[in-house]
Image (spheres, rainbow, N blue to C red):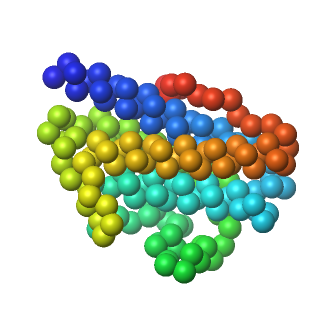
Amino acid sequence: MQDSIMIKDALWSQFGASLDMLENAIHMCPDEHWDTALDFWYLSFHCLFWTDYYLSVEPNKFEPPKPFTFSEFDPTGKKPDRTYTRSEILAYLEQCRQKARKHIEELTPSRMNARWINESKNFSLLEILLYNMRHIQHHVAQLNLYLRQTIDRAPKWVSQVKE
């Protein structure tokens, strides 16, 4: 039992740090770069949409919160019909943070091995958490590159969740 508590603490420490890094990049983006050809807003939304989806224990029952849509499932790669605001994206990030925290707190050794299955993936709940964290960090790196290219600054590395 003690081992599972240590695993959950480590998972939250690193998953939460990934979300903190995403939040820091979103905050650092100047207003004039939010909706440009670099698609800072869209990449932030994309990252959060999939974070939310991968945190859904039953992916076939996933529903993004309003005002977000299922545009990410569009096979043509069509973006949402409008640009999401920074405040909408930050609110979504907070929802994802709460969902991740709850999901990780509820993990038990047997639950970690439960399956997360969709049309193309069949992972344990532990593995989908790690996959999800890698996806977040991939996009945080892109956002940080955009910031370096446009304002010659990027947020610092976050080693553990700030909470």
> Quarter-wise, where is residue 101 in the image?
top left
Percent x, y of residue 47: 54, 55
Q: Position of residue 116 (x, y in %)?
A: 26, 55
**27 horizontally vs 90: left or right:** right
Residue shown at the point (60%, 37%) measured from the top left: 21
Task: Say left or right for 39 vs 119.
Answer: right
Camera-side residue: 4 or 122? 122
Q: Position of residue 148 (x, y in %)?
A: 79, 42
Residue in the image at 68% along x and 58% along y: 41
The furthest residue to the bottom: 76
Can the viewer see residue 157?
yes
Determine the residue located farthest toward the top in the rendered image. Answer: 2
Q: Is residue 75 left or right of residue 101?
A: right
Task: Specify whether residue 26 is in view.
Answer: no
Residue depicted at 22% across the width and 41% down the height: 112
From the viewer's side, name the closer residue of 93 and 125: 125
Could you tell me which residue is drawn at 74 percent across and 37 percent down?
Answer: 154
Q: Exactly how many numbered labels are in the figure?
A: 0
Quarter of the image that includes the N terminus: top left
In this rendering, position of residue 21 left or right of residue 148: left
Compared with 101, 157 (above or below) is: above
Instruction: Estimate the x, y position of residue 51 in percent, counting from the top left.
Output: 45, 52
